[in-house]
Image (cartoon, rainbow, N blue to C red):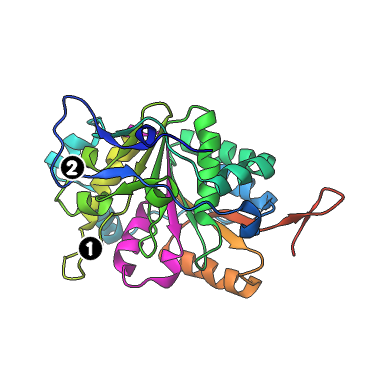
Amino acid sequence: MSFPESQHAVQPEQNLPRPPHLHAEAKRPPSVPFDALGIAGLGLHAEFVEAIARPATSAVGEESAPPEPETARAQCEASRLPEIEAKSVAAAFEPVLRVDSLSWPRPSRRLRQLADKQIERFADAVQRVAASGKKLVGVASASCGEGCTTVLLSVALRLVELEQKVLLLDGDLEHPCLPEQLALANEVGWRDVVGGSLRIEEAVTQSDTQSVALLPYSGQVTSGNVPGPSTESLQALVHRIRAQYDIVLVDLGATLQTGEPNGTLAEKLAEQIDSVIIVRHVELTCPAQLADFRRRLKELGVEEAGVIENFVHEARDGSAQKT
């Protein structure tokens, strides 16, 4: 199906200034036959829905000990934002870049159809958790090509159907691809916002007909000589998007596993995420690799909510089979 280019061209909102360096336009990705991608289904571990819906608790028999004075003081100081940032936290913003609607990629639409029950369970669990305040949900994998972006966008489709106000945040610092997947070409992103060169409303692209927005990482390659953003500036960004959206889905890709060359920034971002769901390509990542990645998340202090097995084929009796 073809769409008029004008429907997907990002236009600045009326009566708002558009900086000369901002530019985002429609970009039609090449059409790829779904069958060629090898996606036939999605296996959702039963432990996932239970884990993501269950609040964090101490192990049985353990009592939560009060933090040491020095630790408590450090946590308190780290949570404080400058007064000017604290005021901006509660302030709503209106995205400058607008599109009529997003052009959802065919693989995500097909996965939404083929694994409808699993996707709906996933989305419903995310919605319940977000209602409790855990709005930032990351999707990550042990290696590239496991289907993080496809799964994330399929779940986003379901959340939009539920009329949730969703932000898609591109956190794959090695291979950011959300703008391309959504047929957009963005020149700026949240890396520019936390770096202090851009306001957040100038980096978010909002759909006018759907309750979904996109915040890319960056549309341009960032020079390695540019100093990384501070933890405080990243905290300020996260506080603002928490206040603005019902749910924030973060596409992490394999950034947390590779760690280079953006390891420090990836770890700072991971600290702001409430929970992470692992996407495992059953034909690509073996159990040992999955175990290594889970240990890596634990080392980073990232809460793992569960595992989604991608590229799971359905047997004749209707049960999920790994091939």
Return the residue nearer the eye: 18 or 174.
18
Return the residue nearer the eye: 64 or 294.
294
Give the quarter of the image for residue 300. bottom left
On the image, the x and y values in percent for residue 208 come to 36, 27
User: Which residue is label 1 attached to?
Assistant: 222
Q: Given this view, does label 1 or label 2 mark the residue nearer the observer? A: 1
Query: Does the magenta portion include 180?
Result: no
Tag 2's secondary structure?
A: loop
Q: Residues within 10 Å of mark 2 (few under 14, many from 20)?
A: some
On the image, the x and y values in percent for residue 297 come to 47, 64
**Quick check: 170 above or below 133?**
below
- Residue at position x 53%, y 64% in the image: 145
Could one spot residue 288 in this view of the protein? yes
Query: Does the magenta portion include 260?
Result: yes
Callout 1, which amino acid? Answer: Thr
Marking on residue 199: 2
Tag 1's secondary structure?
A: loop
- Residue at position x 47%, y 33% in the image: 131
Question: Where does the magenta region start and end?
Answer: 244-273
Q: Is tag 1's residue or tag 2's residue first in the polypeptide sequence?
A: 2
Which quadrant does the N terminus fall into? top right
Name the residue at the right extreme.
317
Q: Residues within 10 Å of mark 1 (few under 14, many from 20)?
A: few
Could one spot residue 60 in this view of the protein? no
Return the residue nearer the eye: 303 or 276.
276
On the image, the x and y values in percent for residue 192 come to 21, 52
Callout 2, which amino acid? Answer: Arg
On the image, the x and y values in percent for residue 268 come to 31, 59
